Image: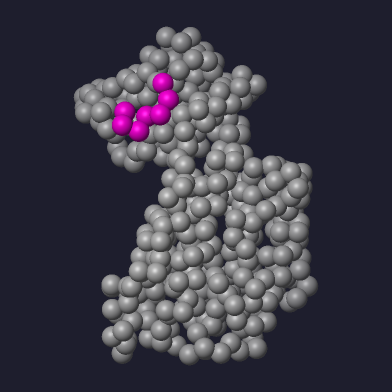
Amino acid sequence: MVALSSIVRAAEPDLSALQSLTTGARPIGKAERLARVAKAQGLMRKAGIGAVLIEAGSSLDYFTGVRWGRSERLTAVVLPVEGEAMIVTPFFERPSVEQTLAIPADVRVWQEDEDPLKLVAGFLTERKLSAQPIGIEETVRFFAFDGLKRVLPDARIVSANPIVRGCRMIKTPAEIALMEAASNVTVAAYRWLHPRIEKGMTQPQISALMNAATRKLGGTPEFAMALVGEGAAYPHGSIKPQVVADGQIVLMDCGCTVEGYQSDISRTWVFGQASKEQRTLWDHVAEGQRIAFATAKLGVPAGSVDDAVRAAYEKWGYGPRYQLPGLSHRTGHGIGMDGHEPVNLVHGEATPLGVGMCFSNEPGLYIPGAFGVRLEDCFHMTESGPCYFSQPPKSIDEPV
């Protein structure tokens, strides 16, 4: 039976010792968004692209400030190679969209019985861009792509990756600062949570405590995954319920946002005394993190970071490659406004590491049927090499 105290702590935790860490966080301003548009336009000219279509989502927010969810009703932006952008949105949504619109833009609306892609086509035709290649952001849904082809059948549709990735992959100091703030919140929440874990607690109770601390510390919870015991052997958990018990692994993967920018930090510890096998696996993962960080030098292919970690793991008897026991996923992923962004630290990724790129460093090790360990800290590339947003833990005995 779960102890009553743990139920109360999860439902109504005492957060009186926590204060917001984000009161000084500065949202991305108009000048930076205009600079992003200008950079995108420069990349368009270089690539010979006339315009880029971006649907609602993080890229729309990135360039325009418009924070909008996706539905069957299209809200999108067209970034032309020159001049102001055009926003297309339903007529009745215009006032709401304009509340967060942070750049000058031509807002065009469509009624429920009209085709929004005709507005896009009309804008491209007016700007004399319909005969030039049109870039499509990689997450745009098929109905928008197909609708544009229908109204502009002769249009040449191309990938907008060189433009959108070319901007978003390189973070500015303002973006780095927000990611640092988000990481500070998550680390502080872990430190508050760790001594409050009790025997018999369930995974949802642990997650609820983490989210409550995150909110009090000034972050917006994005995810708080708690994996206990055997569940930690599977990177994203199992449907099999687990409760905290003596000698069991607790693996947590948590993140929040601050002004739209994310943290992603994993910590692993043992409730009670750690076994020799648990200590060995934890130490190997910590060494994997150190190898990844040391390999992440300016100009090296992103995939070389994963290769270096995997080579060490295979030397220690894990794998080979993605086989278990071992590292069954990539060493890391890009991060920014989205928890997972291009590009990844994965074998075969040739993109060279450059200043402003941000990645997770999470070379976990997993033993099916037993337990797993994942330590995850994110870093950004500077002129002098990688720099952590959060410092890796010291040991399995000092895990946060």
Residue at the (64%, 42%) spot, across then down:
356
Q: In which quarter of the image is the C terminus?
A: bottom right
**Front one among 35 and 318:** 35
The question of residue 131 being in magenta is answered with no
Position of 22 relative to 116 (above/below) = below
Q: Where is residue 378 in the image (x, y as percent from the top left)?
A: 60, 56
Q: Give the range drawn in magenta.
A: 98-104
Is 20 in front, or is 397?
A: 20
Q: Where is residue 243 in the image (x, y as percent from the top left)?
A: 40, 83
Give the image location of residue 368, x and y in percent: 56, 78
Residue 93 is situated, as x and y percent measured from the top left of the image, at 25, 30
Can you say which quadrant of the picture contains the N terminus?
Answer: bottom left
Residue 198 visible in rendering: yes
| Residue depicted at x 40% and y 29% | 102
Does 67 appear above or below 236? above
Instruction: Determine which quarter of the picture holds residue 193.
Output: bottom left
Q: Which residue is located at x 70 percent, y 67 percent?
A: 288
